[in-house]
Image: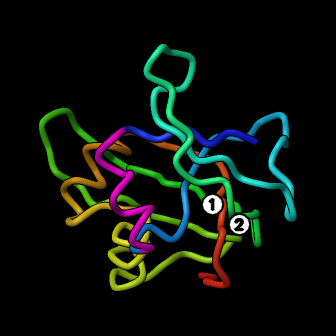
Amino acid sequence: MILGFKKPFKPKLMDGSKLHSMREDKPGRWKVGMKIQMATGVRTKAYECFRDDLVVTRLQHVEIRYYGKVPGEVLAPVIIVDSKRLDDASVLELARNDGFKTMGEFMEWFDEDFEGKIIHWTDFKY
């Protein structure tokens, strides 16, 4: 199944520093063992499939919650993976493993509450 990415993530996917991707999956489409086709420009003329040699090795439920967030205020999120709240070090590790250099970048991308799945293609687990 196609897993679309913005172009800045491509080098991190190619060098192996991005270990997973977090996505909404309300219909439950993603399953362990599915082949992953990583691409940029999905549904455009610029479509490029740059990796198709990986499979889903694990799925983990993830929640990102900004409790008490006030507009303009920087508030670190609470992140829960498979019903376990991550400590600060694990939150930073999750951000980096998802392709972000800093927590600030991660929080800009995930700037509101989120619930979905971590799609893994390595043996890593939180």
Hey, what amino acid is under mark 1?
A: Ile
Instruction: Locate the C terminus and report the quarter of the image it occupies.
Output: bottom right
| Residue extending farthest left | 72
User: Where residue 39 sits: x, y (%)?
Assistant: 54, 40
Say whether marks 1 and 2 touch (CB < 8 Å): yes
**The magenta stretch spans residue 50:** no
- Magenta segment: 7-16
Against 15, residue 2 (above or below) is above
Identified at 54% across, 75% down, the residue is: 85
- Pick the front one: 105 or 63: 105
- Of marks 1 and 2, which one's residue comes earlier in the chain? 2
User: Where residue 29 sits: x, y (%)?
Assistant: 84, 41
- Pick the front one: 71 or 12: 12
Instruction: Locate the N terminus and report the quarter of the image it occupies.
Output: top right
User: Where residue 77 sits: x, y (%)?
Assistant: 36, 59
- Pick the front one: 4 or 69: 4
Q: Which residue is mark 1?
A: 118
Q: Secondary structure at mark 2?
A: strand
Q: Would you say 49 lies left or right of 119 here?
A: left
Identified at 46% across, 41% down, the residue is: 5
Q: Which residue is mark 2?
A: 60
Q: Could you say which disc has been placed on residue 75 in the image?
A: none
